[in-house]
């Protein structure tokens, strides 16, 4: 069993990741580690933000080894996984991009995320009057993965090297519809229609989304990395 500590408090995201990965993985999240830091996502790229999340959590765990030993069995390897993902709309010059989660409020680093409904409303407002053929967009995901090394047998003082971070990416092409549809998913799912589909991610359901999504494609590369 491979233990993944996913650097997020977003339960929707963690559930989606676990469903896509399937068996052979134990998934933990930041809610399992009270006091774990939240990295300021001020990088200019998805890869930069994912890397910052991994390093911030790895550094905190290295300074709080007792937290690790209470949560993870001695024989289990521990990998920190962080993703940064978002929506790139061609008619908006690639926006909202790395600001996808806080699109409706501010671009300031460290700002709280905006509600999904507000983000979607702003996107529709900015695209008002844009012809369907010019509403092309894509979801992009970058995963950063880092293995923590432990002193044996105590599992104290985990160590890591930033140079050991491995990156995986995934892209899902599609377009932005003129109105939200569907009750599933989260984020921009009600507005995003994958290429060659007639329904939004929110209408297609989790099973189909988990075959097509940007995150699914990045996670498939992660599974191959682990030989699963």
Image (cartoon, rainbow, N blue to C red):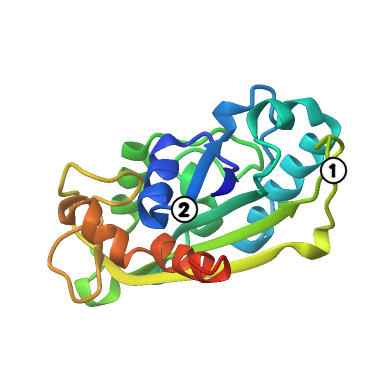
- Say whether residue 6 is left or right of residue 172: right
CB atoms of marks 2 and 1 within 8 Å: no
Mark 2 and mark 1: Cα distance apart in space? 23 Å
Residue 178's quadrant in the figure? bottom left
Residue 186's quadrant in the figure? top left
Q: Position of residue 210 (x, y in %)?
A: 31, 59
Identified at 84% across, 43% down, the residue is: 152
- Say whether residue 56 is left or right of residue 63: left
Q: Which mark is residue 152?
A: 1
Vertical position of residue 89 compared to residue 81: above or below: below
Dot 1 crowding, Cα within 10 Å, few <14, some 14–19, many 20+: few
Q: Is residue 45 visible?
A: no
As helix, strand or loop, the secondary structure at mark 2 comes to: loop
Observer-nearest residue: 155 or 180?
155
- Give the residue number, with chain letter if any, for mark 2: 24
Identified at 27% across, 68% down, the residue is: 175
Identified at 55% across, 33% down, the residue is: 112
Q: Is residue 134 visible?
A: yes
- Say whether residue 140 is left or right of residue 165: left
As helix, strand or loop, the secondary structure at mark 1 comes to: loop
Observer-nearest residue: 194 or 216?
216
Q: Position of residue 56 (x, y in %)?
A: 75, 42
Vertical position of residue 23 compared to residue 72: above or below: below
Q: Position of residue 153 (x, y in %)?
A: 83, 39
Residue 116's quadrant in the figure? top left
Q: Earlier in the sequence, mark 2 or mark 1?
A: 2
Identified at 65% across, 54% down, the residue is: 49
Dot 2 crowding, Cα within 10 Å, few <14, some 14–19, many 20+: few
* Residue at the extreme left: 198
Q: Position of residue 31 (x, y in %)?
A: 55, 27
């Amino acid at each position: 069993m491979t233990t993944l500590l996913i650097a997020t408090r977003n339960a929707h995201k963690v559930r989606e990741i676990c469903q896509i990965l399937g068996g052979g993985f134990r998934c933990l999240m930041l809610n399992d580690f009270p006091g774990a830091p939240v990295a300021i996502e001020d990088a200019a790229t998805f890869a930069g933000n994912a890397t910052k999340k991994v390093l911030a959590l790895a550094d905190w765990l290295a300074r709080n080894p007792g937290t690790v030993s209470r949560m993870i069995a001695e024989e289990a390897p521990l990998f920190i996984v962080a993703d940064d993902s978002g929506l790139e709309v061609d008619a908006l010059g690639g926006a909202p991009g790395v600001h996808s989660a806080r699109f409706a409020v501010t671009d300031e680093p460290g700002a709280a995320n905006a509600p999904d409904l507000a983000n979607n409303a702003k996107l529709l407002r900015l695209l008002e009057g844009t012809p369907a053929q010019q509403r092309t967009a894509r979801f992009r995901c970058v995963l950063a993965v880092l293995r923590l090394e432990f002193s044996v047998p105590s599992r104290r003082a985990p160590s890591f090297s930033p140079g050991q971070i491995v990156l995986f990416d995934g892209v899902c092409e599609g377009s932005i519809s003129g109105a939200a549809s569907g009750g599933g998913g989260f984020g921009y799912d009600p507005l995003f229609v994958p290429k060659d589909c007639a329904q939004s991610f929110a209408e297609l359901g989790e099973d189909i989304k988990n075959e097509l999504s940007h995150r699914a494609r990045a996670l498939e590369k992660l599974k191959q990395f682990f030989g699963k």
